Image (cartoon, rainbow, N blue to C red):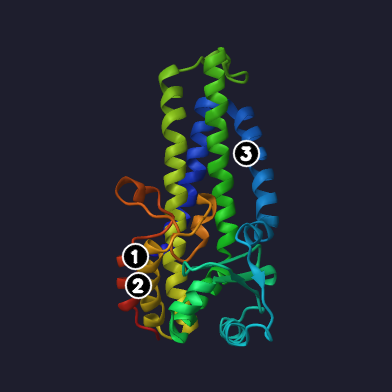
Amino acid sequence: MNNTLKTFIFMAGLTALLVVIGNVIGGQTGMFIAFAFAVAMNFASYWFSDKIVLRMYNAQEVSESESPELYSMVRNLATRARLPMPKVYVIPGDQPNAFATGRDPEHAAVAVTEGITRLLSRDELAGVIGHELAHIKNRDILIGSVAATIAGAISMIANIAQLSMLFGGGRSDDEEHGQNPLAMLAMIIIAPIAAMLIQMAISRSREYIADEDGARIAGNPRYLSGALRKLHNASQQIPLEANPATAHMFIVSPLSGGGIVSLFSTHPPMEKRIARLESLRLA
């Protein structure tokens, strides 16, 4: 199934889950209040997230004179992708990684760690930059913010319902129908987990799209597949003090974990990403 279609289906699933949990637990009033609150929080996050995350990782903006090769590479690839020139940042640290941020292509930034510039060849680094520019071009920051808004609203409604059950509250706008305690309990437990899993699935779908589009921007899918292989191995050996809330932004997860933890991963399995890239034939 096309990953764009998957994203649409997952977003529709999140929306449907919000409607269901709102009607079962919070009623229309509770649903709208939680949704409005989640929109406000995520609007602020979307608007200021670039400055927050860059400061979080102590990223330093570099000019063309300070980092001519990196700056020139970003500029050439941005031109090929028909994007405005993003700001370029370098993050101090040995773990090889990179991410893009910004609310739209006109306010975007690409950040790379010192470690990635030492580990990768020029072609491999071009594959990574292409991937990040694809995120910018596809407005994945916006898509992630919308998904986070809906998932956040679902979690808030579940929390409201939990407090309501603890203190004996009820649904003010639908009392004549009464409450089903078992349905409420199931929703309180299951809905936030389901919302998180769908949100993670959206993130994984966007990674696949960015891999393919990034390979086209760079001009060769093997640039990125070779980079991912090196990055995956190195990220498991070199730690990065990363906030889990921002782990989805990096080209490879800065966090380690397997087994059931992989269900909550924001990144697809590395072997699948590499296999898809190596089977990709550019027109």
Mark 2–mark 3 Cα distance, whole angstroms, equals: 40 Å
Which of the 4 quarters of the picture holds residue 53?
Answer: bottom right
Q: Between disc 2 and disc 1, whose residue precedes?
A: 2
Q: Between disc 2 and disc 3, whose residue precedes?
A: 3
Residue on which disc 2 sits: 229
Element type at mark 2: helix
- Judge from the rendering whether residue 256 lies leftward or rightward of residue 17; answer left or right: left
Question: Do the numbered discs 2 and 1 sit on residues whose CB atoms are within 8 Å?
Answer: yes
Mark in front: 2 vs 1: 2
Q: How many other residues sit within 10 Å of disc 3, few (<14), some (14-19) or many (≥20)? A: many
- Judge from the rendering whether residue 178 lies leftward or rightward of residue 270; answer left or right: right
Residue on which disc 3 sits: 35
Element type at mark 1: helix
- Residue that appears at 46% across and 55% down: 202
- Looking at the picture, tell me which residue is in the foreground, 281 or 46: 46
- For residue 270, which numbered disc appears in the image? 1
- Residue that appears at 67% across and 83% down: 66
Image: 161 above or below 120:
above
> Looking at the picture, how far across and down is residue 33, in whole percent?
66, 33
Instruction: Tell me, yes or no, if residue 4 can be seen here.
Output: no
Q: How many other residues sit within 10 Å of disc 1, few (<14), some (14-19) or many (≥20)? A: some
Question: Do the numbered discs 2 and 3 sit on residues whose CB atoms are within 8 Å?
Answer: no
- Residue that appears at 60% across and 60% down: 57
Disc 3 marks a residue whose amino acid type is Phe
Disc 2 marks a residue whose amino acid type is Arg
Image: 28 above or below 182:
below
Disc 1 marks a residue whose amino acid type is Met
How many marks the image carries: the answer is 3
